[in-house]
Each structure stands twice: as structure tokens, then as C-alpha cells.
Image (tube, coloured by chain):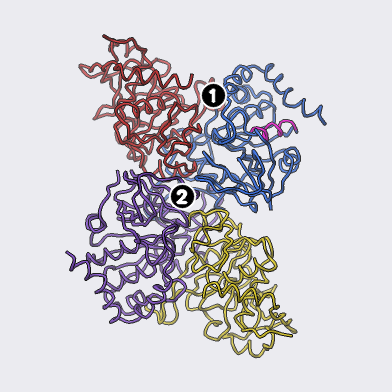
Chain colours: A purple, B blue, C red, D yellow
Amino acid sequence: MARILQLDEAIAELVHDGDAIALEGFTHLIPVAAGHEIIRQGRKDLTLIRMTPDIVYDQLIGAGCARKLVFSWGGNPGVGSLHRFRDAIQNSWPVPLEIEEHSHAGMANRYTAGASGLPFAVLRGYRGTDLPAQTDTIKPIECPFTGEQLTAVPALNPDVGIIHAQQADRAGNVQMWGITGVQKETVLAAKRSLVTVEEIVDELTPRPGAVVLPQWVVTAVAEVPGGAHPSYAQGYYERDNAYYQQWDPIGRDRERFADWLETVVEPERSAR
Amino acid sequence: MARILQLDEAIAELVHDGDAIALEGFTHLIPVAAGHEIIRQGRKDLTLIRMTPDIVYDQLIGAGCARKLVFSWGGNPGVGSLHRFRDAIQNSWPVPLEIEEHSHAGMANRYTAGASGLPFAVLRGYRGTDLPAQTDTIKPIECPFTGEQLTAVPALNPDVGIIHAQQADRAGNVQMWGITGVQKETVLAAKRSLVTVEEIVDELTPRPGAVVLPQWVVTAVAEVPGGAHPSYAQGYYERDNAYYQQWDPIGRDRERFADWLETVVEPERSAR
Amino acid sequence: MTTEFTADEMMTVGAARSLRDGAACFVGIGLPSTAANLARRTHAPDLVLIYESGTLGAKPDRLPLSIGDGVLADTADSVISVPEIFNYWLQPGRIDIGFLGGAQVDRFGNINTTVIGGDYADPKVRLPGAGGAPEIAASCREVLIVMRMSPRSFVDRLDFVTSVGYGTGKGDREALGLRGRGPVKVITDLGVLEPDPDTCELTLTQLSPGATVEQARAAVGWPLKAVDVPTELAPPTETELAVLRELKATIE
Amino acid sequence: MTTEFTADEMMTVGAARSLRDGAACFVGIGLPSTAANLARRTHAPDLVLIYESGTLGAKPDRLPLSIGDGVLADTADSVISVPEIFNYWLQPGRIDIGFLGGAQVDRFGNINTTVIGGDYADPKVRLPGAGGAPEIAASCREVLIVMRMSPRSFVDRLDFVTSVGYGTGKGDREALGLRGRGPVKVITDLGVLEPDPDTCELTLTQLSPGATVEQARAAVGWPLKAVDVPTELAPPTETELAVLRELKATIE
């Protein structure tokens, strides 16, 4: 049975130093507020997992929360590079960042294997590229029927899977719609899960294309209106495109980033 | 681009003697009319594939269309055995029937591999059972990361995948809803596909839980109202439970079955 | 005052009572579906019913006629594909309880639903086959087997192992990599068998009202072990019987 | 009368013209998305747009801001999960055309979007990484590469092979088990390169209006081969330019 918690309670309870965590969202429904709460609570040594690490992962990395990133495409979509990510990789600032790099197809299959209770997944991928030489979680595998060579990748089973959805009901059943990416797999693959939602409603109305996660596979739900900003929540608000552009100069500069970090951490601290 | 055809045209064009064909439907939306048309056209030496062969497969087998059955559960659901199936296996009547037997999980994964363009799928299944000793399409496979022993099954890629859906539009885009089983995978795994539909509409209205197959992955669509009878088509008609019960004495008896066969074949013949 | 009831009703009620509220339960058609729906209407309103056709959290207002009945899709929290049911929901061990029946069961709770007599290629009786059973038996956290007792079905040696209980005894499941606990109860018309904690051999632990250890032994094809004093199952309550009969009436 | 146009506009129009009506096209954000939407509004109204976020058959009425823009989900024939996009749609080779760009391309159409300079562990420039590209390059029936020509990006040797074109030459794709044909065109600001039928080496076959073979050779870091008489690309038509500019205006 999912528990309905406050965001800060949920992060305090579910996310521990050293955990492997996945905050997923494919452009849409990115759990940004949850990421900021992790920064606020000063988590360290996290392994951050995500297909498309973007601004919120740049922020977590810049804040020194991460020791490792498992990913397939890291960038500020439509704008350019993630400079905190680059600074961590190229200059170990503020702490060294190990990376484990895959392709989207590989990451999607790793989540799928994790959600399926399998130790690995098989795909047509990576062959001929330089990725297998750098990433030891990519191995060849042979079809036992045809002898064909394919690629195996190990399951992802994060300690915590965190996603944002439009709605939950009071029992903690979750509904999301629009582009839902790999979020269902993230929750099903994770040992513990947190879903932040735009609103908690009395009853979920079935919608075309909706994905439903029943309460018995969700650990906690937190109501966080606007929790996906600056990404969007279909039916609630649009993408804040300016934020993505404005992030670029902040992310480029350690001092400006430090100032930004104060604005995330402080208001909450002083409110306590 | 899917072509809109008459059912008899579609079967004549898509289904050939000796083909491996899958008519899928999990209790709901069983493409029975398409199966009867195959009987009517007198196809022979078919490999019939289906997770849950029920009455329409009993009829195809009894009519002598099949030389092999690939399946995971064969029965008249809620009633009992398939007697034409039993007669073929136990007495080679009217022709010998080879079988390739799996579990549901294995068959579902075989379709999934077929739909995914992979030669095989991996699952936790079959271990400790007597199935691998009888079915050479079940093999052990080792996880290249953990060394764990799992099971591999080869992809299913039928020559023809046949399903029944509620609706298609005039371009051949298909929409089905309710319990949709393994039908999407069947069409995606098959080399050619036929979707019979309750009705062709001007526009498909998105519905909660609906599965859409775009026209460019469907070979042909045929409008066949009632084409799933005696199974049901959610939103159109209920399951004809009496038919399932009435089938039992017909299927048990070769003569009564022969009489039934006349009723399927004759009206169409005399109409030509 | 006691109401009359049949052995089948006792068996269904016993199965229903084994389902704790809030559990996720993989339900097959027939008695398991009746038992699960009975439980949901009595002591376990939050029982989560999962049918292999792809319905998660179905809340049917009548007994479904098949595992793919429309009433299941209409009332489910979510309807998903059959591959997803097996891969995302059953295989990872998310489902608490799986129900199984069969034509034959042996002393270690292994089940046959494939062939009887002769050999596989030329059987005396061809049964429907495996369906979802092998993976339900492997992956549900616990399995409940429900079968009427008779020497023809409770056999010393299966003609075919379709689904694994405890294999040849304790430790076999672990060696095979089966992650669920295995069959925790065999619910029959005469009583309940449970695996011996040390050997995993099925042992008579409970008797249906009026049934005796001797009756049970006579109905089993191997020398059935029994605990010293099997407990007697409480007969169906008036409520259980009324709800059960009302449910059954919905499909007649 | 000729309207003025930029090299980027020519490149986008050239990419759009390469998309035949009815084709299923795997679209990335930026120029590929612009080109695909331009094609859909001009000669290819039935072009099927597929975005890796999971939208099949999107028909956006403005340029999407990202590959996961809400307008894609709102207008798609079907919205599916990211694992499904890669497994059921891309991997089996159902998609006719995939668009790729990158920081570096070599003479066999291999692409780098991972690191520049130094080595992998300590690069001079860390790029975003692979994303969907390796499997788009492997599995789409045909690949179109779109990149501005410069010696920094058209290089003799990639710093990292993120996505495979023709590997080290003819036959490599088959040996690697890559089932798509590979890059059939590299569309640049100066002209179009196509693989030589015998060697698969990229060869200049078409020139943008006003561009010369010498200019192209100067912009490429290997000794660029060219056909004897490259054809000249027709400049953008008034309609193409008008539609393109209107599209671009939707996101400004």
C-alpha cells in the first residue's frame, strides 16, 4: 500500500547516502522538485541513473551529491551541454564523477530487465561502436538457437525510483498520461519508489494512453504541484523553455552555480 | 499501407498451404470468422500457432487444415477438452498433428521476441518441468553478468498473423480495447497480417486502454461484423456462452463434426 | 443451527479464507476465481485480483465466465498485455498468491496438467497443457493448490511434471532458481495438506468437518503423513455460504 | 526570380526532399524535425513521424521544442513507452529512415557524439553521448546524416565511434549483423555525399547552388572523392522557403 507523505519526509525516508537512484522522465514529467529536495537534504555518494540526464542532474552533480552517473544522453535539450556534468568529468569538481555510459536502447532494456525480474536483457545494439570497450556492462551473447551474436546488458534495479505523474488517488494509485517514457519500468525495477504528483484526487478517471501504477507497487506518493517544472505536465502546465536557456550561463560558471544552489537550499532551511 | 479487402480475398491472398499462421485472441476478440474462411478455402499443412487454441482451432484441426500446433493451453474454456485436437493427437484423425508445447509465459515471450526483431527471448520459466525434454525450442541460457541459469525460447515470426479488432479507419489504422492479449505482438511479429474488424469508421476516437496499430504495419483489414463470435467484442456483443457448451458434443463425435463442417463450407460454396 | 453445505463449498470457502486482505492474487477460472471473489466480498475487500488475460485489480460484480471476461477489463485498475502480465508482474515475484489445480499432484506438490497415461507422444489422455501454471508455480510468493482428493489425482508418481512444487524435496526449488516459496497449502474436499517444514512432503494438517484421517489416506495414492491431531476446519458461516451461493447464481 | 536563402535552409530543404511520402521516419530534434515537418507540409503529407519519446505518427501543428514535446503526444496515432519504441519499432527494422547528426563523421559515415580529444576517461570535450543513435544507425532501413561541413567535423579518424556507418568499408555492416542499409546520404551545407557503390566511401555527388568541389574538399579532413560531374541541387522553391520559415516562426 502506497503511503501519502510530504516530499521532504519521503526523501528523508527513502533516499540514503550511497544509494543508486533513478529520477526518470523523458522531457515530460521530470521529477525536478524531488531532485531539489535531495540537494536540500545534502545526500552524498549517490549513483544517479537516467537515460537523459538534464538540468536537474546537472544540479545534483554540481551540488556534489553524486559519485557516479549511469546514462545514455546527457545534455540541456535544445540548448547545449551540461556544464556541471562536464566540470565533474573533466575536472572532478566538486567531486570526481564516474560514468557508466550506454545507448538509449540499452538503458531502456536495462530498466525492462529490472522490471521483469531478469538479470539481463538482450538487444541488437552497440555492435561496431567504441562503447563496449569503455563500459563493462555491455557484453556479447549468442542466440542458443541461431548462433547469432547479440548484445547483453545487465538489469537496472535502483534502490529508489522516483518519477512525477499527474495524479494519484488517496490509496496511492498513480495515473500519468502523455509521454510516459520509461517511468513505469523505473518504478517496477526499483526496490523503493516515490511518485510525486500534481494532485491527489478522489478518483482516477481512465484516460486514453494513460499508464496506471497500482498502489501496491508504489512505496510513497507526495503531492507536489509544479513538481516537474521547468519540464511540463500535460494537462497542467507547459514547458518553461526560458528556464532551459537561462540555465546555460548559470551552469557554465561555478560561482553563479553556487549562488543558484543557495536559492534552492536556503528558503527551505530558514523556513524550518 | 493497409489494404481494405473482403475476408475471402484477404485469406486467399495472405494464407497459403504450408504457412505458419497465428490467429490470436485471449478469450476476447478471437478471429473466428477468419478461421472459418480458412477452412472454407481448404488450406492444408498449416502450422497453427496460438497460446490458447480453443474451438476455432479445434475446427481447423478437425477439418484437416493443420499439420502442427504450437501452443501453451488447449481447451474449450470453462467447458472441457478439445476433442478434435485430442483425436488428431491420439489417433492422427483426420491427419497426424505434430505439437510444439510451451507455457503461456514462454509463448508470450516468443511473440515479444518476434515483434522485437530478436531471434530469442529469455525468461524465468520451465525449470524443473518435463517440458524441455519434449520441446526442443526450450534451452538453457546463462546470464553473462551473474552466471545465473535461465531459459531461452526462440522468436515466433508467423507467416501470417490474424487478429480481430473493434475498429479500423479507412486508411487501415486499427484500434482495439478491453483485453488485448498478445495481439499487437502477433501482428508485429508476423511477416503478413490480417485484421478483421467489427466496423470501419471515419475516424478512430482515442479510448482508455486502447491499443492502436498504425496502418503501415498491417497488411490487410477486412470488415467482418460479428467476426469474433462466439467470443465477444467489447462494446459490440457478449460472449455466446451456449456455443461453447454446444460445441462439446459436436467436437466429441466425428460424424456430428462432419455435419457441422458442411454447414460452414456449404453456404459459401453455394453462394458463389 | 448449521446450514447444509457441499464438500465443494467447503473447499471454496477454505480457499477464500486463505487469502489475506490486501494480497495480490493470481486467479484462474473456476474455483480459484470463485474463492477470490468470495474473499473480496467477505473478509478481504482489498484483495487485488489479477487474471492472466491482463487485468490488474479487477473488481467484477459477477463471476467472470472466462479469464478474459469483459467484466474484468471493465472493472480493472489497469488492463495490460499478456506479455506484460507475465514479464512485469508475475516473473519478478510481485504477486503474493497463485492458485493452481491440476489432474495430478504428487507428495511434493508437483502438478501435472499435460498428459495422463501412455507416453507424451502417445498419451492415454491429452490434457490442456501448461498455460500459465509453470511460471505461477515458480514465481508467486506462495501457491495454493485446490483439488478434490482421489487416488487418481493424488498420485505417487506424476505422468508429467508440468509445474514444480518442491521437486524431489527440500532445497530443490532453490537449486532450480525458483524464487517463490512453493505450495503452502493443498486445499481439498477432505481437508488441507501442508508441506512438512523439514522435508516439504505434503502432510495432512486440517480436516473438513466430518472427514477423517482414514478417509483422506484412502483418497491419496501414496502413504499420506498426517500431524498427530489435525485441526478441524470451521464449517462455512452463514454469510460465507450466502455470498458464495449468490456469486454462483450470477453465472447460472 | 530567386529568393535569397541560407546554407542551413538549403540543407533543411535538401533533407526534406529526401523523405518520400508514406515513409516512416525516426526524427530527432533540431534540423531533422524541421526537415520532416517541412516534408509533411509539402510533398509528403503521409510521412509518418516517429520520435524516440514514444510518439508514433505525430502530426504537430508547430515545431516541437523537444523530442518529448506535448504536441507530439497530442497529435500522435499512438503514444507508447520508450522501451517499446526501441524494441518493437526501431530494432526490427520497421522504420524506413533515421536521421543522424554528430560532432564528427568519417569517410565511411561513422559518427562520434561522445568525446572529442584526449581520451575517453579524460576528454577535451565531453559531448552528450549516444542517445538513440547507435541503434538508429544499425536498424533503420536507411540513414540520412545531416551536418555542416568543416574539417573539424568531417575528420579522417573519429575520436570515438558512437554510431556505425559502414565501419571500415563495404561488408562491415553485414559482418557486424547490422541490418539496415546504413547512411545513404550525408546532407551538408555545401552539397551531398553518397556512399560509393563499390567501396561505401562517401563521395561528393551533389553540390548546393553556388558551391564548388574545391570548397567541399577544403571543408573535409580526408581526401574527398567526388563524382566527375556533381549535379547541382535545385535551390529551395518559394513554397519550400515560405513553409520552412513559417515553421521556424512557430518556435520563436
Q: Quadrant of residue C162?
A: top left
Q: Are marks 1 and 2 in contact (CB under 8 Å)?
A: no
Q: Which mark is residue A223?
A: none
Tell me the mark number nearer the camera, choosing from 1 and 2: 2
Question: What residue is at 37 percent from the left and 34 percent from the top?
Answer: C25
Pick the quarter of the image with the C terminus of chain A. bottom left
Question: What residue is at 38 percent from the left and 16 percent from the top?
Answer: C8
The chain containing the residue under callout 2 comes to: A
Residue A43 placed where, x, y %? 23, 65
Residue position marked by numbered label 2 in the rendering: A210
Residue A27 placed where, x, y %? 44, 64
The residues colored magenta run B32-40
Return the residue nearer the eye: C108 or A29: A29
B172 versus A229 height, above or below: above
Can residue B132 be seen here? The reply is no
Pick the quarter of the image with the N terminus of chain A. top left
Residue B185 placed where, x, y %? 56, 46
Return the residue nearer the eye: B250 or D57: D57
Q: Which mark is residue C126?
A: 1
Amino acid at pointer 2: Ala
